[in-house]
Amino acid sequence: MAYSSLNSSRWKATSAWAFSMVSLPRSSSDGGEFAHTTSIMEGEITIVSNPTVNVRLTNTISSFESMRRFNRGITIAELKGKLEMIVGASPSSMELELFSVSDIFLQKMDDNEALLGSYPVDDNCKIHVIDKSGQISEFTDVSKVEKFELPDDAYEKRTDSARSFMKKHGVGQFNEEEKAKKRAENAARREEEKAAADALSVGSRCKVQVPEQPTKLGTVMYVGTTDFKPGYWVGVKYDEPLGKHDGSVAGKRYFECENKYGGFVKPFSVTVGDFPEETYDLDEM
């Protein structure tokens, strides 16, 4: 079926059936919008519809979605020319896909000579633009954005900066009273942690209880500070392969055990006591 544009609001199909589209205003009570009716008389189909349509636009160049209004009487080639100014892709590299209001794929819009109105395009349908050139939008490619960096000493001298405001009002890290309080709390916590560590001895059987982890039984293999994190740590060789390593962390060995049997926990998570290693007698199974 071939199509020809008669005017901005009428199309006619040259086939056994005559197809035309005309625009008629509704009554004033309908707000002056265009009516949408269909009638068949003596082999002629007449559809009265709005000559324009509002569609959602998406594309492969960016993640943005926009809404635009187009005349149903323009060709797909003309539509691509308008889309070039919106999405930044060349019409020659465009592929258009039509989706329903509920984002269900309907069909490709691949006939450049066809009219937009010849496709089942309704208000709030989506036209997805696929750019086959593979270009990256200059609005999303941040690698080309020149970065501005202000040296710390220059920023320190500014009187209109956030740092200057925080200093003036004693906010955040510049609140000396709050900083002193936190230093005292950290010092007290370190002393408590050290006391808990001093109460543990290498070779003791223990139970390890860490929040949101299963209870594990094992043997204390190391107590003290480490290079991988500050504070006091307890190295444990577990009875089962529930650990993370073989007693070495970041290339430094703290104790010996099989791989996946070793782990480090805070002293507060360790309880020493009479926790005999469980043995499984295969003859009884």
Image: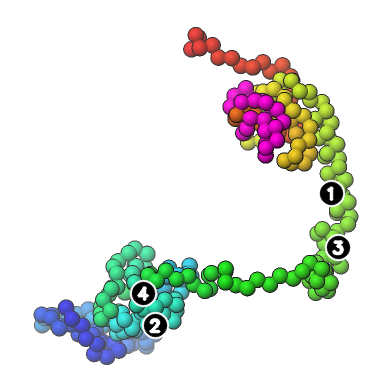
Tell me the kind of residue under disc 1: Lys
Q: Position of residue 178 (x, y in %)?
A: 86, 54
Q: Position of residue 146 (x, y in %)?
A: 63, 73
Question: Label 3: which residue?
Answer: 170
Q: Which mark is residue 93?
A: 4
Q: CA distance from mark 2 to mark 3?
A: 56 Å
Q: Earlier in the sequence, mark 2 or mark 3?
A: 2
Query: Residue at left 53%, top 70%?
Result: 140
Categorize mark 4 by other alpha carbons within 10 Å: few (<14), some (14-19), many (20+). Answer: few
Question: Label 1: which residue?
Answer: 182
Give whichever of 99, 167 is nearer the camera: 167
| CB atoms of marks 4 and 1 within 8 Å | no
Q: Residue furthest front?
A: 251
Q: Earlier in the sequence, mark 4 or mark 1?
A: 4
Q: Is 49 situated left or right of 58 in this image?
A: left
Which-is-in-front pick, marks 4 and 3? Answer: 4
Question: Label 2: which residue?
Answer: 82
* 131 w.r.t. 117: above or below: above
Tell me the kind of residue under disc 4: Ser
Q: Helix or strand or loop: what does disc 3 sit on?
A: loop
| Magenta run includes residue 82 | no
* 215 w.r.t. 83: above or below: above
Q: Helix or strand or loop: what does disc 4 sit on?
A: helix
Tell me the kind of residue under disc 2: Lys
Q: CA distance from mark 4 to mark 3?
A: 58 Å
Q: CA distance from mark 4 to mark 1?
A: 61 Å
Q: Earlier in the sequence, mark 1 or mark 3?
A: 3
Name the quadrant of the N terminus. Answer: bottom left
Categorize mark 1 by other alpha carbons within 10 Å: few (<14), some (14-19), many (20+). Answer: few
